[in-house]
Amino acid sequence: MSDDDVAHLLRSDETLVIIEAPAGCGKTFQGASYAKDVAATLERGRLLVLAHTHAACGEFRKRTQGASNRVEVKTVASLATEIVSVYHKALDVPPHAETWAWKDNGEGFNEIAQKCADLLTRHPMIGRALVCRYPVVICDEHQDCTPHQHAILMALHRGGAKLRIFGDPLQRIFSGTSPKVARVDAERWESLKAEGKHATLEVPHRWKQGGSLELGEWILQARAALLNNQPVVVPAKRPAGLQVIVADNRGQARKQFALDAAHRKTVDAVMLRDEMLVLTSSNILVDALSAYTNRRIGIWEGHTREMLGILVEALQAANGNAEAVASALVAFVSGVGTGFSMSSHGNRLLQEIKEGCCKTTKGKPACIQEMAKLILAEPSHVGAARALKLLGGYIANKIAGFDAIKIDYRSEFGDALRLESFATPEDGLSELARRRAHFWRALPPRVVSTIHKAKGLECPHAMLIPCDKSFADTAYGRCRLYVALSRASNSLTLVVPSFGGSPLLKLE
């Protein structure tokens, strides 16, 4: 269907419209244009845009700035949390549902969505009341909605909301990895298309507008192959912008990445260029690739703060126990950087706390003792944050004994320092997450990221390394590969091992 036909269908009187939207084919442009046009005509309420990732929310906010007083943008999880907070007593949830939802490092949001869906199903009048506020709803990235999040959307539709859904079943990487879940999600998508009016975006705008059109057309062909459970053919005559490098990881340890001299020169020439997004399959490889470049490539942290969530949980459990606070601090720093571990610094920190910092020391032990004093004075998130701030100063000033420490996840480390200013660590975690949701950071010139954290991003150049068996011939593997392939507009480099490559790629 042409872009004009899709735009016309979105603006029609149909109450439910579903747009299948391959990456780079103008989904956000269509959605944001529709939002601005319709918001200007609303007699009451606001148009609501719901997305799954904060990256997508940030892009919609940027593109609807002129109509921001009539357009509200948030994640589906945020909407569910707001609804549950209003009815927290009836649902047996604390008043600040978002703070509660961060339990188990964010797993509480699944329970929030379930409670919200059940509430709207049992009490349709609540859905109708919401529709008075939000008569038109756009849902972006629907393929990543959980069943409960989908139920929330459909409750709004039953309550009278005009619903516009954008999704791509081949970008489904957040809602589950099992074949059964993938099958259920696929059936739900087909059922949804049958229920409403459906169209597909087909023009590769990301590559037409200043990129490589040949690359864009090849990526659409790759999408068609993956949807049909076929391997992606990489032709001998490569499309303009597509490069393949055959190189093997020679790292001897699970957390190490290394290439021989000949291959390193070839890979580095591409990896270290400006405007490069390096994509890989796991956090372990992200850390390894950053270390491989001697940290000339930074790490894209995205919105999530896994280690910060673990730190907050540990601080809650510590409940005034200074030794437990210190152990939580050591685990956190070990998780966001290198060179700081229980053996290198942590044992001494625990010793100082056990002994009450009673001995006079010099050098590195004296510095650790100062950290211990802060924790003993405030055996809570306050003391931990102050000790981390002191540690950050040691690292920045290259104090002996701390000069080898490298903080890879700098934003996450910075958020931990800010916990001091909140009444509880849970309050801090929740508020810091809320702030990140409304602040969109641009990609650095060179960065390495997991595929999950790069979802929703686009860039001139990308490298996928390594294209190995981690991209298995499963529904989940096909989705991950497609998301990775479709990020770059100008050039895409695939680093493929000489053996053990992905079965989803067929090199000619």
Image (spheres, rainbow, N blue to C red):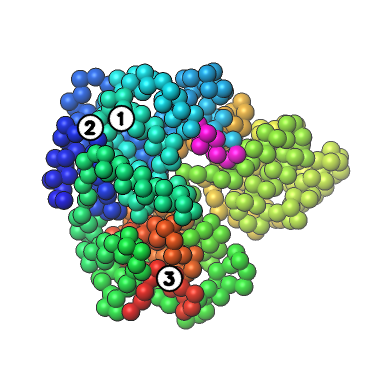
User: The residue tagged with tag 1: helix, strand or loop?
Assistant: helix
Question: Which residue is denoted by mark 2 in the rendering?
Answer: 15
Q: Where residue 292 appears, x then y in whole percent?
A: 53, 67
Please tell me which of labels 1 and 2 falls first in the chain: 2
Q: Main secondary structure of the magenta part?
A: helix
Residue at (34% x, 57% y) in the render: 487
Please tell me which of labels 2 and 3 falls first in the chain: 2
Above or below, 493 against 135 in this view is: below
1 and 2 marks in contact (CB < 8 Å): yes
For the residues labelled 2 and 3, the Cα–Cα distance comes to 42 Å
User: The residue tagged with tag 2: helix, strand or loop?
Assistant: loop
Please tell me which of labels 3 and 1 falls first in the chain: 1
The range drawn in magenta is 104-112
Give the residue type at disc 3. Pro
Question: Which residue is denoted by mark 1 in the rendering?
Answer: 157
Q: Quadrant of the rendered structure where residue 55 is?
A: top left
Q: Where residue 422 appears, x then y in whole percent?
A: 59, 28
The answer to whether one can see residue 401 in this image is yes
Q: Where residue 324 appears, x then y in whole percent?
A: 75, 40
Residue at (22% x, 28% y) in the render: 39
Give the residue type at disc 1. His
For the residues labelled 3 and 1, the Cα–Cα distance comes to 41 Å
Question: Which residue is denoted by mark 3 in the rendering?
Answer: 503
3 and 1 marks in contact (CB < 8 Å): no
- The front one of 82 and 363 is 82
- The front one of 120 and 26 is 120
